Image (cartoon, helix red, strand yellow):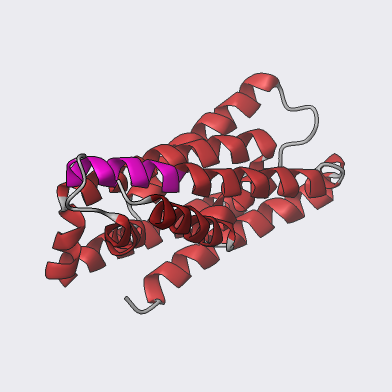
Amino acid sequence: MPSTELFIAFLATTAIFAYIPGPAMLYAAAQTIARGRGAGLMASLGIHLGCYVHVIAAAAGLSVLFHAVPMLYMAVKFAGAAWLIWLGISLFRAKAQGDVTLPAIEAKSGRRAFFESISVEVLNPKTAIFFMAFLPQFIDAQAAFPVWLQFVILGTIVNLMFSSADIVCVVLAGAVITRLRRSGGAQRLIQRAGGAMLVGLGAHLAFQKS
């Protein structure tokens, strides 16, 4: 593992990255706006679990393949973008759910947000590139722990810190919209706003430069 000084620098840098608004944070907020705080928290959990795919991939060196084979990177990138846009459009088409919604329907929305967010995170090659570019700066090849285990430990810390930022975003978004959800018209408006955020994130992912 890195020295104490390097580890402190790692934690500080990770915190800065985590709490700068990014796609995962905005995605969790969009799910909260469209489906409620419970769905937002489930989306955050799905993002967290999906991110471990990239942690393991970084440890195994799969991210290097994205650098070596640009076409593979582009394929995964556009697949993820298309998935986000499809989710956004589905929110536009969905009917607004008022306060009379039964708990079973709310649970279904939470489960849906959970599984959708896992897919979104797994299909995000930027996350894989981030781990491969960021973590090696804090890996000590001479340490007692093997390099792959250092990747897993540091990647897990990064994932937990990013998830904490997502949860804070969900709580804040939930607090803002709680009163608005009492109005059917307002609820339909914020549901469309959530859909617009997802479509926008998908378009940004598709057209941003690699």
In the image, residue 160 lies in the stretch drawn in magenta: no
Report x, y in % for residue 149.
23, 40
Q: Is residue 133 visible?
A: yes
Q: In which quarter of the image is residue 206?
A: bottom left
Residue 49 location (% of width, % of height): 40, 37
Q: Which residue is drawn at 17% across and 71% down?
A: 70
Percent position of residue 138, x then y: 32, 57
The residue stretch that appears in magenta: 146-159
**Residue closest to the far front:** 4
Q: Quadrant of residue 118?
A: top left
Give the vertical position of 63 relative to 175 (above or below).
below
Identity of the residue drawn at 41% across and 50% down: 4
Which of the 4 quarters of the picture holds residue 125?
Answer: bottom left
Quarter of the image with the C terminus is: bottom left
Q: In this view, does 90 lie to the left or right of 116?
A: right
In the image, residue 164 above or below residue 107? below
Measured as percent of width and height from the top left, residue 145 is found at: 21, 39
Query: Is 209 displayed left or right of 194 in the figure?
Result: left
- Is residue 152 found inside the magenta-colored segment of the image? yes
Prevailing secondary structure class for the magenta stretch in the rendered image: helix
Residue situated furthest bottom in the rendering = 209
Q: How many labels does the image show?
A: 0
81 with respect to 195 (left or right) = left
- Residue sitting nearer the eye, 123 or 101: 123
**Image point (61%, 54%), residue name:** 92
- Left or right: where 104 falls relative to 1: right
Would residue 69 be visible to someone looking at this image? no
Closest to the observer, 88 or 53: 53
Please identify the quadrant where the N terminus is shown.
top left
